[in-house]
Image (tube, rainbow, N blue to C red):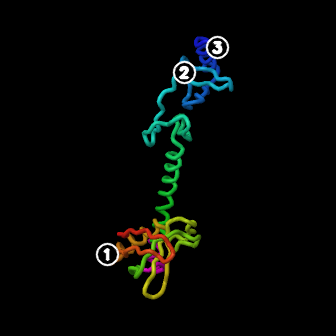
């Protein structure tokens, strides 16, 4: 099929339909009057695909990269997923912080500094901060107190609890260093 006939077919297609086809290679919408080739499988592709940039990370989207669409713009699949997770996590974080703040006020969570703090991976138990289940394999903090009480927290809930605990005491108290739990991998980080 000649290039002129391809252009005329695509132009006619664009005039008849509000939805134009996407290139089979770069996955960008083909606009009328662009040079295209019709493939044997019935799909259309540019003769020379334009460089496609992800609007989130500003990296080139390669033809074999998984994509999602943000309207008409192609986005890396991972960039899209991270943006969705971040949006839902920010909503959940505000709720978790409020729950932890209320539990501290009510005395359900201790305002005292723990004697020991371990970082490891969750085993499916409930978080003492927000009350939700800590996913198996997700970062988890266990804190012990001198009166033999052990609490478990999501990583984010632990940080909220530490911040609220210190803030509620007027800046007093100290954050505990994270030590490896026997039989668990250590976070090897100091929590401030």
- Residue at 51% in and 40% down: 75
Q: Are marks 1 and 2 in contact (CB under 8 Å)?
A: no
Dot label at residue 1: 3
Quarter placement of the N terminus: top right
Q: Is residue 150 magenta?
A: no
Few, some or many residues within 10 Å of mark 1 (<14, 14–19, 20+): few
**Numbered disc 1: secondary structure:** loop
Residue 84's place in the image compared with 109, above or below, is: above
> Where does the image place residue 26, in percent across and percent down from the top left?
54, 31
- Residue at 54% in and 18% down: 35
Dot label at residue 100: none
Q: Determine which residue is flagged by label 1.
A: 170
In the image, 51 versus 114, the foreground residue is 51
Dot label at residue 47: 2
**Distance from Cα at disc 3 to Cα at disc 1:** 78 Å
Residue 185's place in the image compared with 71, above or below, is: below
- In this picture, which residue range is highlighted in magenta? 101-110
**Distance from Cα at disc 3 to Cα at disc 2:** 13 Å
Few, some or many residues within 10 Å of mark 2 (<14, 14–19, 20+): few
> Where does the image place residue 185, in percent across and percent down from the top left?
48, 70
> Where does the image place residue 183, in percent across and percent down from the top left?
51, 75
Residue 41's place in the image compared with 179, above or below, is: above
- Residue at 44% in and 42% down: 57
**Numbered disc 3: secondary structure:** loop
The first of marks 3 and 2 along the sequence is: 3
In the image, 47 versus 125, the foreground residue is 47
């Amino acid at each position: 099929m000649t290039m002129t006939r391809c252009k005329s077919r695509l132009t006619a297609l664009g005039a008849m339909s509000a939805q134009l086809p996407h290139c089979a290679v770069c996955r960008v919408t083909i606009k009328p009057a662009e040079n295209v080739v019709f493939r044997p499988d019935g799909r259309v592709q540019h003769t020379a695909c334009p460089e496609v940039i992800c609007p989130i990370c500003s990296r080139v989207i390669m033809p074999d990269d998984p994509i999602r669409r943000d309207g008409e713009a192609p986005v890396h699949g991972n960039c899209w997923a991270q943006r969705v997770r971040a949006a839902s996590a920010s909503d959940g974080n505000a709720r978790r912080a409020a729950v932890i703040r209320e539990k501290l006020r009510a005395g359900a969570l201790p305002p005292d500094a723990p004697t020991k703090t371990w970082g490891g991976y969750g085993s499916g138990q409930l978080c003492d901060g927000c009350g939700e289940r800590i996913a198996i394999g997700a970062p988890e903090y266990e804190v012990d107190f001198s009166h033999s009480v052990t609490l478990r927290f999501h990583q984010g809930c632990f940080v909220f609890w530490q911040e609220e605990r210190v803030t509620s005491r007027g800046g007093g108290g100290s954050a505990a260093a994270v030590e490896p739990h026997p039989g668990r991998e250590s976070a090897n980080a100091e929590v401030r």
